[in-house]
Every structure is written in structure tokens, then in C-alpha cells.
Image (cartoon, grey):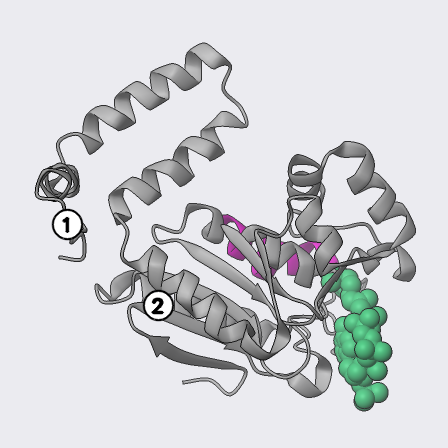
Amino acid sequence: MSDVLVTTHRGAAAILSINRPQRLNALTPEVFSALQRALDECEAAPDVRCVVLTGEGRAFCAGQDLTAELPRDAEGALDIGGMLDRDYNPLVLRLQSFPKPTIAAVNGPAVGAGASLAMGCDIIVASRAAYFQQAFVQIGLMPDAGGTWLLPRIIGLKRALALMLTGDRLDAAAAEQLGLVYRVFEDAAFMEEASALAEKLAQGSLSAMKAIKTALVQSATNDLAGQLHHERNAQAQLGRTADFAEGVMAFQEKRSPRFHR
Ligand code: T3D
């Protein structure tokens, strides 16, 4: 149990909601620990087949808590690098390799590392009121938590650079047009719609979705021949799974597959 993170369940989807609304869900070491613990639980629970990350109140996440005391090294100098090593980077890497699909349900501002956290999830959906902001430059920092890797790959180098150099806000509609956001939902129905998408993913084949995630990560460093090789081996393994047998049988029997076993 944690008072900085609320976990609820909707069918086979777990909804993790950062719970510091008075600070716009800004990130502290306690939030990171709670998120890691919740992911441990979601990974281990067979009845959890999709994870949704969102924020309580009017924000998704305003990035690092700028009012919290920051760590210092042995000489007393600010140790932001140590903080990234301990809290931010492990979470971003964990989301990338998480064996179940993840959705960032961006219900409001996603700012600084809050935007990076959203990009670390597999799919981003946004409420009409949401926006994304690479605010780092406004406090004399550069984007972190994977932002400089993720954003240019998602929206292109020049757009990412412009957003990072200016710190301009990107509203939900523009983010959808650029491909950062998969769907924008109206504010009133936002969590209903996000949960419905999560439930849909939760009905899918976890082995197939995990393989898809891994293949797309590999594609960032493989050439075409390497990627063909990777696909060949991964597909060969999927072909031997119960999910593939069930998928083909369901097709032949003209019914929906039942992967959740
Ligand atoms: O050490 C390091 O910093 C390294 C790590 C870096 C990673 C990062 O994430 S750097 C980027 C950090 N985040 C920001 O720079 C964003 C700061 N916040 C804002 O610019 C604005 O609050 C927003 C654009 C997000 C929203 O503006 P608005 O007008 O809707 O709300 P507000 O009035 O500014 O904020 C409401 C409250 O939330 C306010 O508290 P108060 O005055 O009512 O007591 C504000 O101080 C608090 N809040 C917002 N963001 C943060 C925060 N408190 C702590 N940390 C925050 N990041």
C-alpha cells in the first residue's frame, strides 16, 4: 500500500494512478518506489493483463518535484545523475521491456519527465484537456528519462528539437496528429474510454504482444537483415504457443479467441 499511488482494477487491467494532485503528481523517490512495487505486483498477477498509468486530479505528471530536496554527492554537490540512475532510468527501461502492454492515460499536463514517463508506455491516450511540454529548458536542464531517444523517434528529429528548445506546449489534438498520441478522448468519458482500450488489450495474446514489443525495440538497432532474422526466430517460437493454436481454432470456429488462460 502507498499513499502516493492508487491501484484499481477494471477487468484484467490494473490502473496505477499517481496520487499527489496538489503537486500535479510531481515525481519523488516515494512515487518511483511505489510504481516499481506496483509493477512487480502487476507482472506477477496472472489476472492482470494490461497496465494503465494515469494521474489523480487535473494533471498526469508535472515531472520532477521541484520543491523536494534533491540528492547530493559526497562533496555536497547536486547529484541529479545519481537520481536518474536510481529512480528514472530503471523505470523507463522496465516499461520498455514490461511483459504486458502498458497505456499512459494522459488526463492533463504531462510535463518534463512526466512526458518522458508517458512516452515510456506502449500506447498514449490523452484527454482533450491534456498537453505535453518539454519544460526542462525553462529550468536550465535538458530532457531526460529517455525523452531525447523517444521523442525524435516518435515525431521526427526537427519537431522534437523545436519542442525541446522552446519548451512550447503541444496540445492533445496536435500530439495526436504527430503520432505521439494514439487517441484523444473527450474529458467527460476519458477514463471510461482509456479503460475500454485497456480491457481490449487485456483480451489479447500476451505472448504475441510481448514479442511485438521486443521486435520493435530490436528494430532500433537492427538492419533489415538482422530484423528479418529476429522476426523469423520470434515467430517460430510464437508458432509453438497455445495462443497460436487457440487463435487458429477460434478463426476456424468463427468465434473470438480466448487467450486468457
Ligand atoms: O533535479 C531535477 O530536476 C532533475 C530531473 C528533471 C526531470 C524533470 O522533470 S525537469 C522538469 C520539472 N517540471 C517542471 O519544470 C514543471 C513545473 N511546473 C509547471 O511548469 C506548471 O506547474 C505546469 C505547467 C505543470 C502547470 O501549470 P498550472 O498553472 O496549471 O499549475 P501551477 O499553479 O503552476 O501548479 C499547481 C501546483 O502544483 C502549484 O503548487 P501551489 O502553488 O498551488 O502550492 C505548483 O507549485 C505545483 N507544481 C507544479 N509542478 C510542480 C509542482 N510542485 C513541485 N514540482 C513540480 N514539478
Q: Which residue is mark 1?
A: 255
Which numbered disc, 1 or 2, marks the residue that appears first in the sequence?
2
User: Would residue 10 appear left or right of 72 to someone viewing this image?
Assistant: left
User: Would residue 184 appear left or right of 101 to someone viewing this image?
Assistant: right
The picture quadrant where one finds residue 195 is: bottom left
| Mark 2 crowdedness (10 Å alpha carbons): few <14, some 14-19, many ≥20 | many
| Mark 1 crowdedness (10 Å alpha carbons): few <14, some 14-19, many ≥20 | few
- Nearer to the camera, 183 or 221: 183
Q: Which residue is mark 2?
A: 13
- Nearer to the camera, 179 or 256: 256
Q: Across the whole image, how many numbered discs are drawn on residues? A: 2
Please state the horizontal and vertical placement of residue 15, each as a whole percent of the image.
43, 73
Q: Are marks 1 and 2 in contact (CB under 8 Å)?
A: no
Q: Amino acid at mark 1?
A: Arg
The majority secondary structure of the magenta stretch comes to: helix
Q: Which mark is residue 171?
A: none
Quick check: is 85 in the magenta stretch? yes
Quick check: is 124 in the magenta stretch? no
Estimate the spatial distance between the alpha carbons at disc 1 and disc 2, rounded to whole Å.
Answer: 23 Å
In percent of the image, x 34 and y 50: which residue is there?
99
The picture quadrant where one finds residue 58 is: bottom right
- Nearer to the camera, 153 or 87: 153
Give the magenta range. Answer: 80-93
Please state the horizontal and vertical placement of residue 233, each as a whole percent of the image.
27, 22
Q: Amino acid at mark 2?
A: Ala
The picture quadrant where one finds residue 41 is: bottom left
In percent of the image, x 46 and y 52: which residue is there?
94
Q: Nearer the viewer, mark 1 or mark 2?
A: 1
Please state the horizontal and vertical placement of residue 225, each as a whole percent of the image.
43, 10
